[in-house]
Image (spheres, rainbow, N blue to C red):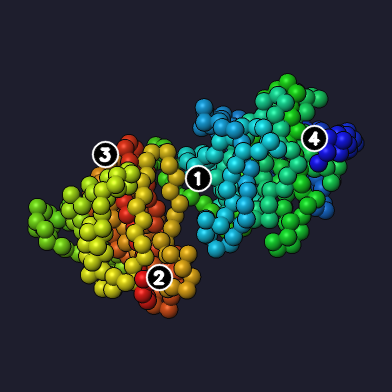
C-alpha cells in the first residue's frame, strides 16, 4: 500500500475510533441496586451482562478477585516475551505439521507469556470457571495467554480465527480515565473500557467454520499506564495439555496413580543383572499394558542418548536390535513398525497428551504403541496414563508397550498418555507405533 493510502486508512481508522460508543461495565452497574456477588453460604455469583445482541458480546464483572489476579501476575513473573501472531493454515486432523505457527509481527507490539494448563490449583479453578462461562469443555481451552501493554504498545486489527469458536478476554487492572487501552471493534463501533477483574466474551463464528468478520478487533494502546490482561481462547478441537499442577497438591495427586517401577519388576522376576528379556503384563483389561524392565542395555541406551544429542555415532545395529525385540514382545512383524522417534524432555517443557497413533498415515491402522526410557532422572519424568491411573517410573532401557486401538480400528482414548517433565536434567526416550499391516 502506498504512503498516501496508508495515511488515508489511518485517518479513517481514527475517525471510526473517535465515533465509537464506549462500553464501561462500571457505568452500566452504577444504577444496579443489588451489587451483591455472594450468597449467604459464601458462594460467588457471576452476573453476565449482554451489551450487544447481534453479534452477542457479554461482560462478566468481578470474574476474578484480587487474590487470583495477583496469583496470575506472579506466575507471569519475568517470563514476558514479545508477542507473536499465528501464521499458516489450520487443520482439524491434529497434524501439527499443517497447523498454525507463531511469529513476530509489526501488527502487534505487546508482550505476552503462556501459563501451563492447570499449572496451579488456582489456575485450574479459573479455567473451570472460564469453561462454565463459555459453555465449552475445558479440554478445548488453550493455555491462558497473559498479555502486557506498556504505554504506546498495541495489537492492531485482527480476527482470532475460525478455529477459535469463542474468545474470552480478562482485564487484570484498571486504566486511568481517558488513558486509552480499550478493546475496539471497528465494524461494530464499540470500545470496551478495561476494568479490573472484568471478562469480555464473544463468538468468532458466523456459522460453522465461517468467520464472523464483525468481530475484527484491536487492542488500543494505553497512553501512560501499563495494561494487563489474559487471552482465553476456546479451540475447535481438544487442545488441553494435561500438566499436573506444581503445588502442594502434587504429592496427594501422585497417590492416585498405581506406580510401576522396572527396577522392582526385575527384583520380583529375578532378572536383575542378567541379559534375560522379560515382559510383564501390568494391565490385563483393555487397553492392555506390557512393561519390559530391560529391553535395552546400558550401552545401547547411551548410544541412543548420544545420537539424540547430535553425535555422529552409528546406531543402525542398535535400532535393528530394538525393533526385533519390540516385535517379539508385541507379537507383530518388524515391518509393521513406523520409524523410531527419539525425544528429550526437561523441566518447564510442555508435554501434550497423546494416544501415539500415527495419524500421519491415515491409510494405516494403528494397533500398539511403544515407549522406551533411555536414561534415568532424579525426580519425576514418569510416563503416565491419566485415565487409567497408572504411571511408569523412568528406568534406562525400560519399555512400555500398550494397545492404542480396538479390534475394529477405533482409537482408544483410554490409552492417552502423558510424559511428565523431570525436575532437573533431561529425560530421553524413543517411541514407535505398530500398524496392522506393513509400513515399510
Q: Residues within 10 Å of mark 1 (few under 14, many from 20)?
A: many
Task: Report the residue marked by disc 1.
Answer: 117
Horizontally, is 82 left or right of 403 in the view? right
Report x, y in % for residue 88.
Answer: 62, 52
Helix, strand or loop for disc 3: loop
Mark 4 against mark 1, which lies toward the viewer?
A: 1
SS class, disc 1: loop
Q: Residue at x 42, y 73 (%)?
A: 365
Q: For label 4, count other residues whose C-alpha is less than 10 Å away and answer few (under 14), some (14-19) or many (20+).
A: some
Q: Identify the residue shown where x is 37% and y is 44%.
A: 345
The Cα–Cα distance between marks 4 and 2, rounded to whole angstroms, is 54 Å
- Asked if 208 appears above or below 45 in the picture, the reply is below
The residue to which callout 4 is attached is: 24
Question: 91 left or right of 404?
Answer: right
Label for residue 378?
3
Residue with the mark numbered 2: 366
Of 261 and 97, the residue lying toward us: 97
Task: Decide if residue 328 is on the left or right side of residue 143.
Answer: left
Residues at marks 3 and 4, CA–CA distance in whole angstroms: 52 Å
Question: Mark 1–mark 3 contact, CB under 8 Å?
Answer: no
Find residue 265 and name its label: none
What x and y, as percent, mark residue 20?
87, 38
Look at discs 3 and 2 and give the one toward the viewer.
Answer: 2
Amino acid at each position: 500500500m502506498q504512503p498516501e493510502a496508508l495515511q488515508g486508512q489511518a485517518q479513517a481508522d481514527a475517525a471510526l475510533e473517535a465515533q465509537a460508543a464506549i462500553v464501561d461495565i462500571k457505568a452500566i452497574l452504577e444504577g444496579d441496586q443489588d451489587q451483591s456477588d455472594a450468597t449467604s453460604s459464601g458462594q460467588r455469583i457471576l452476573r453476565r451482562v449482554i451489551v450487544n445482541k447481534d453479534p452477542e458480546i457479554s461482560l462478566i464483572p468481578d470474574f476474578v478477585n484480587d487474590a487470583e489476579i495477583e496469583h496470575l501476575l506472579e506466575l507471569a513473573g519475568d517470563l514476558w516475551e514479545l508477542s507473536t501472531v499465528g501464521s499458516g493454515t489450520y487443520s482439524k486432523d491434529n497434524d501439527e505439521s499443517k497447523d498454525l505457527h507463531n511469529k513476530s509481527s509489526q501488527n502487534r507490539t505487546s508482550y505476552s507469556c503462556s501459563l501451563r494448563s492447570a499449572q496451579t490449583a488456582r489456575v485450574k479453578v479459573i479455567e473451570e470457571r472460564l469453561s462454565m462461562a463459555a459453555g465449552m469443555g475445558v479440554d478445548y481451552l488453550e493455555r491462558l495467554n497473559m498479555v502486557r501493554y506498556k504505554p504506546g504498545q498495541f495489537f492492531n486489527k485482527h480476527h482470532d480465527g475460525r478455529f477459535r469458536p469463542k474468545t474470552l478476554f480478562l482485564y487484570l487492572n484498571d486504566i486511568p480515565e481517558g488513558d486509552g487501552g480499550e478493546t475496539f471493534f471497528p465494524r461494530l463501533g464499540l470500545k470496551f473500557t478495561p476494568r479490573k477483574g472484568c471478562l469480555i466474551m464473544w463468538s468468532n463464528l458466523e456459522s460453522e467454520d465461517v468467520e464472523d468478520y464483525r468481530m475484527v478487533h484491536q487492542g488500543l494502546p494505553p497512553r501512560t499506564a501499563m495494561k494487563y490482561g489474559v487471552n482465553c481462547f476456546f479451540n475447535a478441537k481438544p487442545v488441553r495439555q494435561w500438566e499436573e499442577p506444581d503445588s502442594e497438591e502434587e504429592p496427594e495427586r501422585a497417590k492416585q496413580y498405581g506406580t510401576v517401577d522396572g527396577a522392582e519388576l526385575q527384583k520380583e522376576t529375578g532378572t536383575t543383572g542378567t541379559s534375560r528379556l522379560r515382559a510383564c503384563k501390568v494391565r490385563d483389561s483393555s487397553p492392555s499394558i506390557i512393561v519390559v524392565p530391560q529391553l535395552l542395555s546400558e550401552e545401547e541406551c547411551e548410544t541412543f542418548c548420544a545420537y539424540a544429542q547430535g553425535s555422529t555415532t552409528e546406531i543402525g545395529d542398535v535400532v535393528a536390535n530394538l525393533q526385533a525385540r519390540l516385535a517379539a514382545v508385541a507379537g507383530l512383524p518388524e515391518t509393521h513398525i513406523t520409524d523410531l522417534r527419539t525425544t528429550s524432555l526437561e523441566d518447564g517443557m510442555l508435554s501434550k497428551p497423546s494416544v501415539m497413533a500415527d495419524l500421519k498415515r491415515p491409510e494405516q491402522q494403528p494397533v500398539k504403541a511403544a515407549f522406551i526410557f533411555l536414561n534415568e532422572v532424579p525426580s519425576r519424568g514418569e510416563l503416565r496414563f491419566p485415565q487409567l491411573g497408572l504411571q511408569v517410573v523412568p528406568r534406562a532401557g525400560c519399555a512400555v508397550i500398550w494397545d492404542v486401538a480396538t479390534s475394529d480400528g477405533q482409537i482408544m482414548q483410554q490409552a492417552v498418555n502423558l510424559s511428565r517433565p523431570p525436575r532437573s536434567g533431561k529425560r530421553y526416550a524413543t517411541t514407535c507405533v505398530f500398524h496392522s499391516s506393513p509400513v515399510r
